[in-house]
Amino acid sequence: MDLLKEKKSPLSISAVDLFCGVGGLKYGLQQAGINVVAGLDIDKTCKYPFEENNPFEENNKAKFISKDIREFTGAELSELYPEDSIKVLVGCAPCQPFSAQTRKNKNRSSDERWSLLDEFRRLIEEVKPQLIAFENVPLIRKEKIFTNFCNKLGSLGYHFNPKLIVYCPDYGIPQKRRRLVLLASTWGEVELIPKIHSNSPEDGLRPFQTVEDAIGDLPEIEDGEEHESDPLHRSRQLSDINKKRIKQSKPGGTWKDWDEALRLPCHKKDSGKGYTTVYGRMEWDELAPTITTQFLNLGSGRFGHPKQHRALSLREAALLQTFPKDYKFIEPDSPIVTGRIASYIGNAVPVDLAKVIGESIQKHVRENAN
């Protein structure tokens, strides 16, 4: 019997998470009832948060494997799956080489992260899991490496929609975030579950989650201050001039709200006049911008708090990424390296998006695997 097309019963689903980071994708999949057995990442500091956080106490801890995917074999991957389970392979290769910020860089294909998608493809070819999930920035669709990836999936017998763009607010994520989500199966095309939020009352769905919904109940802190009951509720210290700038910034406004003396030289040039979101404040009743690894920096986007004179705290960014409030990013009593934790948070798949992916896989398996 062809294992690739074999339909298992009972429905036991096991997933391995490539490029797993601190486990945002894993956590959401587990919430959807998928057994994540292991995660692979080259960053060994992700081991504690990946293994420690589980949505349900009865869940077995997924195994963290600190290894470069280039050195990880299909045989090693196959051994991770329980013998009688439906195999799911998920992976969110680093998106930075394909983002809008690097698109003008002619040498970006020389970035060592560029070829990681090929390694994901290689493992699919060697193991042939029944289902695959992949998430990245929408611009990756324009790259030959993604076209080659899709062509290989097609030649292996997978069904998928290579142009599925998910608007994250439709699924309760309070960010203006769009992501490409590729769900592939040997049994037919996987449909994403219907959206559950809308900005239109006529749709009869829940309203979008706002910045206030996500972080409005957190206690106030000053810039550079750490809240006594939550070490991750801390924001980066602002320079004197940036304190003046944010005090003159209006929620949803731009640097044009500032006194002339506070404006940067680039704002006075035609080339810089279009960059209106940097140093900006978010709005309580609106969506947040896409959370990146640079959210601690006021000048990297609209990352100013709607009311307080500071940039986002680590905890606020994690909540906007839909991590639960009690998510453990570091071991107890460990020193907090803010830049590292910001990278953990900014690089993660939003937990609620991961749950949607997991629920879509579950629905597809129920409808096709018996």
Image: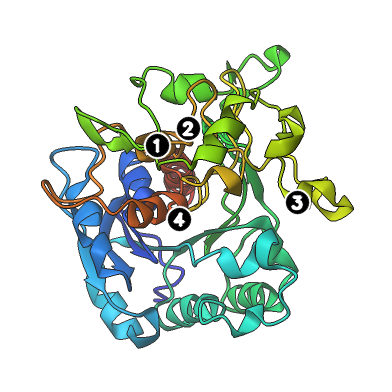
Front in this rendered view, residue 37 or 156? 37
Out of 363 and 304, give the one closest to the viewer.
304
Q: Please give left or right for residue 192 compared with residue 361 in the image.
A: right
Residue mark closest to the camera, 2 vs 1: 2
Left/right placement of residue 204 relative to residue 369 reads right
Q: Amino acid at mark 1?
A: Ser
Of badges 3 and 1, the one in the foreground is 3
On residue 7, which mark appears? Answer: none
Q: Mark 4 = which residue?
A: 347
Measure how far apart labels 2 and 4 are at the Cα level: 22 Å
Disc 1 designates what residue? 313
Q: Nearer the viewer, mark 3 or mark 2?
A: 3
**Residue 262 coordinates in the image, percent (x, y):** 68, 38
C-alpha separation, residue under disc 3 versus residue under disc 4: 31 Å
Viewed as shown, does residue 294 lie left or right of 89?
Answer: right
Say if mark 2 contacts mark 1, CB within 8 Å: yes
State the residue in front, 13 or 177: 177
Q: Position of residue 347 (x, y in %)?
A: 45, 55
Q: Is residue 52 above or below residue 103?
A: above
- For the residue pair 35 and 234, the one nearer the viewer reads as 234
**Of the two numbered discs 1 and 4 in the rendering, the one whose residue sits closer to the viewer:** 1
Amino acid type of disc 2? Arg
The residue indicated by pointer 2 is 310
Compute the Cα span from label 1 to label 4. 16 Å
> CB under 8 Å between callouts 3 and 2?
no
